[in-house]
Amino acid sequence: MVKNQFNTNIVEWMSNAGGEYKSKAFLDMLGNEGIKVSQSIPYVHQQNGRAERLIRTLTEKAKTMRFQACLPPSWWEFSLDHAVHVYNRTPMRRLEWHTPHKWFTGERPSIERLRVLGCGAYVFIPSEIQENKMAPVKLGSSTHRLRMRLRATYM
């Protein structure tokens, strides 16, 4: 996927030596592709400093957004998805004040459709497919750039 989408190769695979990344089939596949495998010492989180910090940052952003939107804890995945979407469109000093989105894709991200998690939204539903009136609530950003995830609340 990386080779097809971004015309580049993966050189090294770094993991925390978790069981899901230690199968013989997975390690053989990486070896066949010429990808170097690096694993940190188990239970030494300091070796994964940047990854651990990113996980904490995104989790805290997601929790804050979910609390502000008054969404239940079971909807954590929507708030995490939205937090990642916002994070990828935030300029960073280590990227010379570019966004991760621009660094990764080469395109300047559009924030014209950026909305607050949990904000009200109205969706036009043609009368021929409309079952009843709906007042959807935005639940996050879709992977497609022109779509949003909505939750229907029935009146």
Image (cartoon, rainbow, N blue to C red):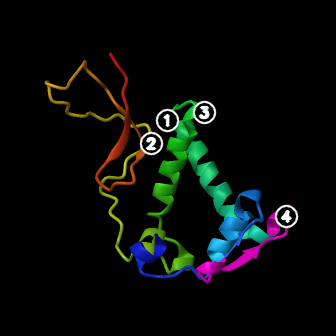
Residue 73 disc label: 3
- The answer to which quarter of the image holds residue 16 is bottom right
Q: Callout 4, which amino acid? A: Pro
Compared with 86, 131 (above or below) is above
What SS does tag 2 mark? loop
Q: Callout 1, which amino acid? A: Ala
Q: How far apart are marks 4 and 1 (CA)?
A: 37 Å
Looking at the rendered image, the disc whose residue lies closer to the viewer, 4 or 3, is: 4
Residue that badge 1 annotates: 69
Residue 117 disc label: 2
Of residues 100 and 9, the one nearer the viewer is: 9
Sequence-wise first label, 2 or 4: 4
Residue that badge 4 annotates: 42
Range covered by the magenta-colored residues:
31-46
Q: Callout 3, which amino acid? A: Pro
What SS does tag 3 mark? helix
Position of 11 with respect to 27 (left or right) is: left
Disc 2 vs disc 1: Cβ atoms closer than 8 Å?
yes
